[in-house]
Image (cartoon, rainbow, N blue to C red):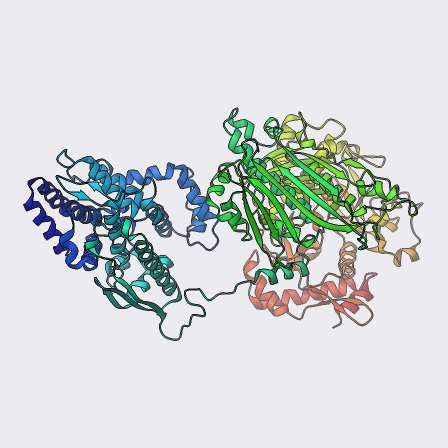
């Protein structure tokens, strides 16, 4: 109990009647405030005690620091100390209404976003989902209702912890209105003193410099009656008393049980910090502390706390004459040994630092160079230009966000007028060469100038740490308020490192819109002789100078290029123009590489969201304007259709066309700049996608020219969702005319086969217009009106000469037209499809009649060609078996030729398989096996074949093997998945007889007997 301070206040109150008001006020608050502090544990059960025991200990610590000098305190100072010790944490008393209001605060949304973007934060996943409107998703970051409650409490606790010092100021001035404390507020004590008390409480959580800064605390102020008070002195004592409350009884065991074993790791670190105290001395002469922690996190938290204490004492002692009311009060105690160590076997490598892997900057940069992180040698061009674009977009948002209605910021197209206000200026210029130079190179300077936000000293500090700009909270708060498509693409500083691949230094001149500072900066390469040195000069602030940045990079290029290439056809590139105009005798210079850099600038500007004015200035060739199309900035531009799916914005542009999946039919951009996504294609469509959401690192490699590893699946799903949304719009609006509509319909049908809904639903809206297509001279709609007709499914090499059927389609999973035709035919109840082999079509006695065979191979040629594996489909309006025995043998033999290893297959039920119908799988079963006849889909029951197809590499070739060595395991696997229950022994017997049937009856009697026999021999 702080008896000494209380006794001193009462003594002073007895000496002067006016001062007794302070004693009376304290008498009320001493009883009222502790009741309120008891509720702190409602929101903060995982915290150390912030109740009356904490307040009392602060006062005891202050009494120890002052000793007998307590008698020198004025009554008002004493009253302020007592009240501040009790009120300073009152901001942690949080009524329900304050929690509700916090959720509406824009700053709270920024707080959520900060946590959501902080890797490894314990609340990161919860914050990513949490919202105040959508109850169905806001708790998606928790695995159970109980966890959701705990995470929400921790989230709100951290928010109010950060605010509690400011809240204490407000509560002290209006305790009844804010939290319901009936602490008297009368004219007997001036409201000015309560405002002073609130400010003192607020300062316990502020940086030390704010105590004496303008708007801080006064050195001396009039107290009550003839008393003076010293707010700065009181605040300093409060801060010291608070920091020194670190003994091992700070945590309440009951509250630890209430918080549970899953309480946050930072809580456990603080628990270890307090329980680690082994020696504690606090008196007028000396402060000494020894601690022995059991955990590394506890050690680090204790070390950090001790550092704060040391810094606080140092700051107060350095400014003591501006703090202490009288020299008679003396100095602060001397700081003795303050030590922390780890107990047991745990060791620390460097004092106060977490033992962990770190990367040496220069070595890391050398490693990046060696691993071709920036695979595009011109990556630096794109990075410098992108940084200029990002800064300018932020500037436009700051200055114009109130302009017009909100819809003008929906997408780049709606904001064309605003985007047209700013231009990026670029110049690539050749420098005069010294006469003495015989290096064979010429100096060039790339200059990029923007009218963006500029760079402040504070911004520069973040820039110099790669990726740290994400921690620049002031800037990030602005960025979070921007439309998604306008947000910067990444962390400024990462891509900028690519400049050091070609230059030893980067020069920057900038004026910041935030701080109004004008600076000149030179950044040297980490691997050059100046080892990453950065020089910063502060320049006079000229009113006429606009905000923005100029970046200049100096580098060497060959004066006369030693290597170059010519395009197949003359193009409009600058590099090609130089190459075509070259005279190897008369030309003294051949700036081919400068031409290639210029072409990169043009390519960037083609899809940039802002206009880029660029020039190439050469000494001998003249000046060349580097003009991009800037198509997206043209009025009435239809370059992109902007679609929002899964909270992501994409620009979508597509055009249906006949043909299978061709990789070059897909182009990808991230915020207008191309990147590589190899192998992606969709059937019957050319597509362009422009990703306008997310950081570059979410989608792309560090060089930003390729898709990042591990994001292909998510990106592909996003693209299909965006494409489906745009297709729905185009169907509704009738975007494509009669000529394209059939192809459009085929594209949607093919997507439905590959991906199901929503494409299946969209296909229903096309009214099967693909039937109006002609394949060669064949009219699809006319064919569908027949009672019987034949479709050939052959590889592309056979299509041109195949005349044995009514319609020939490529058997290509990338085309899917065959799937569309067969699926549409089978939709009608009476319609059936039968698969037959190529050999069966050679027999003129087949039931479907003879076709024109003028171009058929001879039978001998047929046996030696891949045509023997081709399958044909008889479409009829009558009952048919799904496939013939010959078709089955041909298909099994074809699988031997495909040379894919480790596969299993299912087989569609057939009358000839009646003896094995008990092996039929459940309809809803999902297994990793493909159908022997994939074109049928799942139009009937299936059997899992017992064969395991694999490829074996021999010395001279690769051969296929088909074995049943794991039959027992297959039987165990199949048993629980059968349509009807069957004993394991019966399953095995059925499989043995099925193997005999296929090996002896189907394959041994076929033209593929020898190949099958060889594959089956192990």
Locate the C terminus by quadrant: bottom right
Judge by depth and name the residue closer to the eye, 830 or 638.
638
Q: In the drawing, does residue 560 fall left or right of residue 180?
A: right
Judge by depth and name the residue closer to the eye, 868 or 166.
166
Quadrant of the rendered image containing residue 634:
top right
Locate the N terminus by quadrant: bottom left
Judge by depth and name the residue closer to the eye, 278 or 717.
278
| On screen, residue 407 above or below 872 | above
- Residue beneath the point at 34% across and 68% down: 340
Q: Position of residue 27 (x, y in %)?
A: 11, 45
Residue 38 appearing in the image: no
- Residue beneath the point at 79% across and 53% down: 437
Residue 81 appearing in the image: yes
| Residue found farthest to the bottom | 345
Quadrant of the rendered image containing residue 985:
bottom right
Q: Position of residue 316 (x, y in %)?
A: 30, 54
- Total tally of numbered discs in the picture: 0
- Residue beneath the point at 78% across and 58% down: 894
Q: In the drawing, does residue 268 fall left or right of residue 721?
A: left
| On screen, residue 952 above or below 262 | below
Q: Position of residue 84 (x, y in %)?
A: 22, 47
Q: Position of residue 735 (x, y in %)?
A: 68, 27
């Amino acid at each position: 109990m702080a008896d000494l301070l209380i006794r001193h206040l009462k003594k002073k109150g007895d000496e002067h009647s006016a001062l007794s008001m302070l004693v009376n006020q304290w008498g009320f608050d001493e009883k009222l405030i502790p009741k309120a502090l008891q509720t702190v544990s409602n929101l903060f059960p995982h915290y150390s005690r912030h109740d009356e025991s904490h307040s009392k200990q602060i006062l005891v610590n202050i009494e120890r620091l002052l000793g007998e000098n307590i008698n020198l305190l004025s009554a008002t100072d004493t009253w302020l100390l007592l009240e501040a010790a009790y009120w300073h944490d009152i901001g942690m008393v949080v009524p329900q209404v304050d929690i509700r209001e916090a959720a509406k605060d824009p700053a709270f949304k920024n707080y959520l976003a900060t946590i959501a973007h902080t890797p490894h934060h314990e609340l990161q996943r919860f914050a990513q989902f949490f919202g105040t409107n959508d109850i169905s998703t806001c708790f998606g970051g928790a695995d159970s209702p109980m966890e959701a409650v705990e995470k929400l409490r921790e989230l709100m606790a951290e928010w109010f912890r950060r605010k509690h010092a400011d809240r204490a100021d407000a509560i002290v001035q209006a305790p009844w209105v804010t939290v319901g404390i009936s602490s008297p507020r009368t004219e007997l004590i001036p409201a000015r003193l309560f405002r002073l008390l609130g400010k003192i409480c607020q300062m316990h959580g502020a940086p030390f410099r704010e105590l004496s800064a303008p708007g801080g605390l006064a050195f001396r102020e009039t107290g009550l009656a003839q008393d003076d008070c010293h707010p700065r002195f009181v605040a300093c004592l409060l801060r010291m008393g608070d920091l020194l409350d670190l003994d091992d009884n700070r945590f309440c065991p009951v509250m630890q049980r209430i918080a549970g074993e899953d309480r946050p790791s930072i809580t456990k670190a603080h628990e270890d910090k307090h329980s680690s105290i082994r020696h504690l001395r606090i008196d007028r002469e000396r402060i000494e502390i020894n601690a022995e922690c059991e955990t590394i996190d506890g050690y680090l938290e204790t070390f950090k706390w001790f550092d704060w204490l040391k810094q606080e004492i140092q700051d107060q002692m350095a400014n003591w004459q501006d703090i202490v009311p009288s020299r008679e009060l003396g100095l602060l105690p001397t700081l003795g040994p303050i030590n922390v160590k780890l107990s047991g076997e745990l060791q620390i490598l460097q004092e106060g630092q977490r033992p962990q892997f770190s990367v040496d900057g220069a070595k890391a940069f050398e490693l990046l160079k060696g691993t071709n992180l920036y695979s595009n040698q011109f990556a630096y061009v794109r990075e410098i230009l992108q940084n200029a674009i990002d800064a300018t977009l932020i500037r436009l948002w700051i200055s114009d966000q109130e302009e017009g209605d909100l819809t003008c910021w929906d997408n780049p197209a709606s904001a064309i007028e605003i985007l047209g206000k700013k231009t990026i200026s670029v110049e690539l210029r050749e420098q005069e060469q010294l006469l003495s130079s015989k290096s064979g190179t010429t100096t060039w300077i790339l200059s990029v100038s923007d009218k963006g936000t500029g760079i402040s000293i504070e911004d520069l500090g973040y820039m110099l740490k790669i990726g740290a700009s994400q921690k620049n909270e002031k800037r990030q708060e602005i960025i979070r308020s921007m439309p998604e498509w306008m947000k910067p693409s990444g962390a400024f500083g990462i891509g900028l490192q690519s400049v050091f691949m070609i230059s030893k230094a980067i020069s920057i001149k900038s004026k910041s819109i935030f701080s109004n500072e004008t600076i000149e900066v030179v950044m040297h390469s980490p691997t050059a002789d100046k080892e990453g040195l950065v020089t910063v000069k502060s320049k006079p602030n000229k009113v006429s100078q606009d905000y923005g940045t100029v970046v200049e990079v100096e580098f060497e290029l060959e004066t006369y290029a030693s290597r170059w290439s010519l395009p197949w056809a003359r193009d409009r590139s600058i590099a090609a123009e130089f190459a075509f105009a070259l005279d190897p005798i008369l030309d003294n210079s051949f700036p081919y590489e400068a031409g290639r850099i210029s072409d990169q600038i043009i390519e960037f500007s083609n899809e940039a969201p802002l206009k880029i004015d660029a020039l190439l200035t050469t000494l001998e060739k003249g000046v060349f304007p580097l003009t991009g199309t800037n198509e997206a900035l043209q009025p009435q531009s239809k370059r992109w259709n902007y679609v929002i799916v899964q909270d992501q914005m994409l620009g979508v542009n597509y055009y249906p066309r006949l043909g299978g999946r061709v990789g070059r039919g897909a182009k990808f951009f991230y915020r207008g700049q191309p990147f590589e996504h190899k192998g992606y294609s969709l059937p019957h469509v050319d597509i362009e996608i422009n990703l306008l959401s997310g950081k570059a690192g979410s989608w792309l490699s560090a060089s930003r020219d390729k898709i990042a590893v591990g994001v292909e699946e998510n990106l592909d799903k996003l693209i299909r969702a965006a494409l489906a949304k745009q297709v729905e719009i185009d169907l509704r609006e009738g975007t494509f005319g009669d000529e394209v509509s059939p192809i459009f319909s085929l594209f949607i049908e093919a997507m439905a086969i590959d991906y199901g809904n929503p494409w299946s639903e969209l296909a229903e809206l096309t009214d099967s217009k693909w039937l109006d297509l002609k394949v060669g001279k064949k009219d699809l709609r006319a064919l569908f009106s027949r009672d019987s007709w034949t479709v050939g499914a052959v590889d592309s090499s056979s299509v041109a000469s195949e005349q044995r059927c009514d319609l020939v389609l490529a058997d290509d999973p990338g085309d899917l037209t065959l799937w569309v035709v067969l699926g549409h035919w089978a939709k009608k109840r009476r319609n059936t499809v039968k698969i037959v082999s190529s050999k069966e079509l050679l027999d003129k006695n087949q039931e479907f009649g003879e076709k024109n065979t003028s171009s058929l191979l001879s039978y001998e040629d047929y046996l030696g060609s891949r045509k023997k594996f081709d399958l044909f489909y008889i479409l009829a309006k009558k009952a048919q078996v799904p496939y013939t025995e010959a078709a089955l043998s041909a298909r099994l033999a074809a699988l031997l030729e495909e040379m894919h290893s480790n596969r299993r297959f299912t087989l569609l039920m057939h009358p000839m398989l009646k003896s094995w119908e008990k092996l039929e799988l459940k309809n809803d079963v999902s297994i990793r096996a493909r159908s022997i006849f994939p074109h049928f889909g799942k139009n009937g029951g299936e059997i899992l074949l017992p064969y395991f197809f694999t490829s074996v590499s021999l010395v001279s070739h690769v051969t296929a093997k088909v074995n049943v060595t794991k039959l027992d395991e297959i039987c165990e696997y199949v048993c629980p998945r059968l349509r009807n229950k069957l004993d394991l022994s019966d399953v095995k017997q059925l499989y043995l007889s099925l193997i005999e049937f296929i090996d002896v009856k189907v394959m041994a009697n076929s033209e593929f007997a020898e190949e099958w026999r060889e594959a089956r021999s192990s």
